[in-house]
Image (spheres, rainbow, N blue to C red):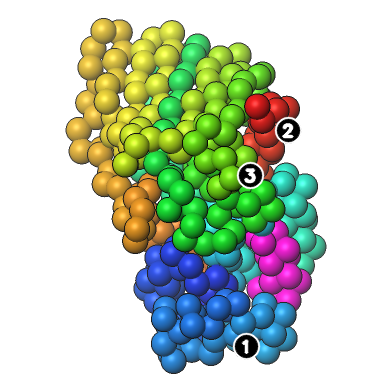
Amino acid sequence: MESSPRFALIGCGHIAARHLQQIKRVGQLVAVCDIDADKAKKLVGDSVPILTSLDVLLQAKLSIDICVIATPNGYHAAQAIACLKAGHHVLIEKPMAIGSGDAASILSTAASVGKQVWVVKQNRFNQPVQQVKQWLQESKLGNILQFQMNAIWCRDAAYYAQDLWRGSADLDGGILYTQFSHFIDILLWLLGDMQALGGYRTNTQHQGVIAFEDQGLVQLQAQSGAIGSMQYSVNAVQRNAEGSLAIYGSKGMVKIGGQYLNTIDWAVIDGEELDYANTNTPNHQYGFYEGSMSHHDQVYDVVLAAWQGKPLSVLSNDDAVKTVALIEQIMQHIPLQ
């Protein structure tokens, strides 16, 4: 095995620059692939071969260890499976896929060919989230009784006009996949498996722009018995308003707040404030819009460790499938009004 992995970057959109930075840090970029050669050249210049077809890339017999999938959501599954069958490990931007069957097929293919798959779930690296994870593992909140998640962001018509795939049912999949799959992942990571009991989905401000809801409310129940809800929207005016999770237990309560689950607003156990100093995490600028913290450096550290045969640690493929499955359940069982 080489001392550092060799990467192919598939997809040269807005998130690609973040991947490119980390690829150069931990390994070597061998090639990039995008149907828009000009976009790819703007990203990498003439430093590596640029291919406009994944089939051509995989047939080129380049020395590639890891393929990074940073294309529109609807392409993730087929492209990941093709890369795995060609003998490469795969890192997939969120979401893993836009169907639980496709997500499961990625894992079964990886197992059959003996290759690894990783999915970007960067919000797990937020310091407030990791602090609350520790408190929950230590049972500092007691039995979890109730929870409330709010994810209220701004994604106006100008955002969707940036790329043709945005807002489409087959390539975007919906705001729960593109904007809020990280939030679903955090719910499941902190509170365990859960199911949607009901809710409401509607498109009020983006009719003719997107093929799905722009706001929704979901009633949830965790396997532990805890009940809660998630309110989500891309209708905030001018800026992202909130990304928060409040958890109420028999011994205490905590709220992760800010715009992106990046602060601890309060934490109380037995009437005493817990120490949560130095846990705030800054947001990240993605060019013309703002979003969750990147943490791609830590994602790539995990990938590098796993590639070197060390434990996978924070990232879990089973959890990635569960995230897709819960979103799928919400969209299938709560009709769009």
Residue 239 % position (x, y): 32, 41
In-front residue for pair 22/275:
22
- Considering the numbered disc 1 on the image, is that residue within a helix, a strand or a loop? loop
Q: Are marks 1 and 2 in contact (CB under 8 Å)?
A: no
Classify 265 as above or below 122. Answer: above
Classify 226 as above or below 296. Answer: above
Amino acid, disc 1: Leu
Residue 278 % position (x, y): 20, 38
The residue under label 1 is 62
Mark 1 or 3: the one toward you: 3
Asked whether residue 165 is in view, the answer is yes
Classify 249 as above or below 284. Answer: above
The residue under label 3 is 211
Amino acid, disc 3: Ala
Residue 158 % position (x, y): 43, 53
**Residue at (37%, 71%) from the top-left corner?**
21
- Considering the numbered disc 2 on the image, is that residue within a helix, a strand or a loop? helix
| Label 2 packing within 10 angstroms: few (<14), some (14-19), many (20+) | few
Tell which circle, 2 or 3, labels the residue nearer the N-terminal end. 3
